[in-house]
Structures are given as C-alpha cells and as structure tokens.
Amino acid sequence: MIETFEQLNPLLKTFWLVAIPSSLIFLFQTVLTFMGADSGDGIEADFDGDLGETDAPFQLFSFRNLINFLLGFSWTGISFYGSFENSWLLILISMAVGVVFVYFFFVIIQQVQKLAEDNSFKLSDTIDRTAEVYLNIPENKSGKGKVLVSVKGAYHELDAISENQAFKTGTLVKIVRIENNNLLVVESL
C-alpha cells in the first residue's frame, strides 16, 4: 500500500495528504459537537485588547473553516483527478469547491441560530398586555399594588400604579407604560 502511494503523481499524493488528516479532524470535531464539548468557532487569543462587541454568527478565519475548506478542496481533487488533463484547472475547481464548503457551513450555522430562542424577561414586553390585579391598586398614584402578567409563557408578579381609578384584586387591566424603570402604569380595559 505504501509502495502504491509512493508511485502516485505528486499532485494526487498532495490531495491525499491533505484529505486524510482533514477528514480525521473533521470527524473528531463532529463527534465533539454532537457530544456538546465543542467550545466555539474560533481560537481564543491570549492578549488583553478591546476588539468591541461583535454579533457575527460566523468567523471566516477559523480552524473549523480551514478544515471545511481543506475537506472540499482535497476530496474534489481526488475525485476529479482523472477527469481533467490540466492540473491548474483541477486545483481551481478544487479551491472553488472548498469555498463552497465554507459557505455551506455558514448557511447551516445561520439556520441553526434561527432556532435559538431568547426567553429572557424584559419589562418592556409587558406594554399593551392584559394583566390581572393581584394586590389592590389605589387610585391617582397614591400607592402601588401588584399585577400578574404572562410574558413568553411565564407569569410575573410586578408592581403597578393607576393614574385615575382604583382596581380590586382579580380585575383585568391593560398595561400602558413603564414609570421609573420598574413600575407599570395600568388602566381599565
């Protein structure tokens, strides 16, 4: 088997030398990803610097993308080695397929991130919602009471005031705005 490998054309030998390790690393990364041990899509830098906040879901220059590129590049070169007489054309086609592999991974990551759901509670999500008075709310902002409101499937007990009328426990009210960053202003439905 080693003798057969030694007799290969240098270009084909190079494709094989790239394909085997990149395939093994790809399999290892895939197993780690499905086990939940994958830590991310980039290499952490060991320096102190403010690079700013980035919301990019995809890092173009990463080890994973290098492996994806090399996987597409090498296996395309091996697969089409006998089909093209011009080795430069084969290298260009292999590089194009490597870029397509990286792009394909980018599309997959985008689709997976669409599945992510942000269930964090924000007080602003309560505006224009109907709530039930939990503790009596006095009239004319003379004191505060509490309301129960459902946001994203969870009930929250929040402080509330009324500008005009008083509301008794069990009354349904509408939340109209937020005062002082933590106090809901309610009115009748």
Image: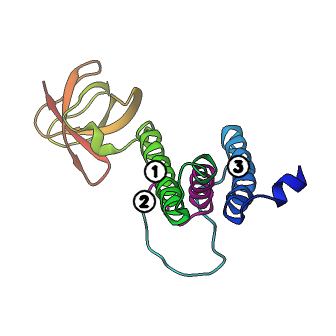
Compared with 168, 98 (above or below) is below
Q: Amino acid at mark 2?
A: Ala
Q: In front: mark 1 or mark 2?
A: 1
From the top left corner, tell me how far across and down residue 182 is, in percent. Answer: 32, 49
* Residue farthest along the right direction in this orientation: 2
Q: Residue at x 39, y 33 (%)?
A: 157
Q: Which residue is mark 3?
A: 23
Specify whether residue 16 is in view. Answer: yes
Q: Which residue is mark 1?
A: 106
From the top left corner, tell me how far across and down residue 188 is, in percent. Answer: 13, 27
Q: In front: mark 2 or mark 3?
A: 3
Q: Amino acid at mark 3?
A: Ser
Q: Residues within 10 Å of mark 2 (few under 14, many from 20)?
A: few
Compared with 132, 125 (above or below) is below
Compared with 68, 33 (above or below) is above
174 left or right of 50?
left
Earlier residue among tags 1 and 3 = 3
Please provide the residue range marked out in magenta: 57-76
Q: Is residue 171 magenta?
A: no
Q: Colour scheme of this structure image?
A: rainbow
Earlier residue among tags 2 and 3 = 3
Q: Amino acid at mark 1?
A: Phe
